[in-house]
Amino acid sequence: MVKMVPVPKHSQISQHLMNADFHDAFQFNLACGKRTALEIYLDVIAKTPCWISFLMALRNRAAPMFGIKDLGSIDNINPSRPSHEYQVGDRVGIFTIHSMTDNEVILMDSDQHLDAKISVCKSSLDADNAVTVSTVVHVHNLLGRVYMFFVVPFHKRIVPSMLLNSDMMPQQKAA
């Protein structure tokens, strides 16, 4: 189950909340707690649902007309590249690694209209291995505000869908 939660106070991304124009966080319990935060992110984006890839392709076709860069595909990763080879500054899908520990990876993208940061943060809650995916956006101008007006409703469906589509969560037992 994926649920909306506050951005975790212990996460590094929480330091970027000041003056943010948008932020949210979604949490789920990890099936296997031995993966690093980057491994979790790579596993999730590798299984991006087709409808999300389609929407991203539409976004990328329209973006240059508004002076916004083409980000490429969310799942544009080399599946044979081991996660331990990634370093801060490497591009992973549509984002660049900003900071990375075993328990949290922060990825970002900046453009003239906004800065967006995504965090995948692991934390143990009781016996469960909780993972929180947080998004923090700082808008720079009117174009960024208009962009976010259209993106936010999709974003609130895309993130949970990507998490549910991955094999990260424990399988539910049939009743």
Image (cartoon, rainbow, N blue to C red):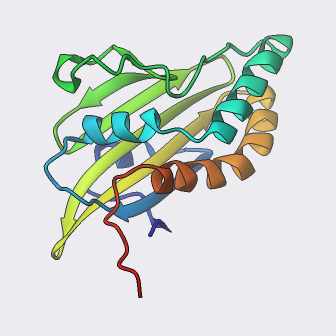
Extreme-front residue of the structure? 174
69 horizontally vs 132: left or right: right
Q: Give above or below for 121 relative to 107.
A: below
Q: Percent x, y for residue 90? A: 34, 14
Q: Which residue corresponds to the image point at 79% horizontal and 11% vertical from the top-left?
A: 64
Q: Percent x, y for residue 28? A: 38, 63
Relative depth, front residue between 156 and 49: 49
Identify the image quadrant of residue 144: top right
Q: Which residue corresponds to the image point at 28% horizontal and 59% vertical from the top-left?
A: 30
Residue 152 appears in the picture as rendered: yes
Q: Which residue corresponds to the image point at 60% horizontal and 17% vertical from the top-left?
A: 72
Q: Percent x, y for residue 52? A: 65, 39
34 horizontally vs 55: left or right: left
Relative depth, front residue between 147 and 9: 147
Residue 15 appears in the picture as rendered: no
Q: Give above or below for 37 relative to 5.
A: above
Extreme-bottom residue of the structure? 175
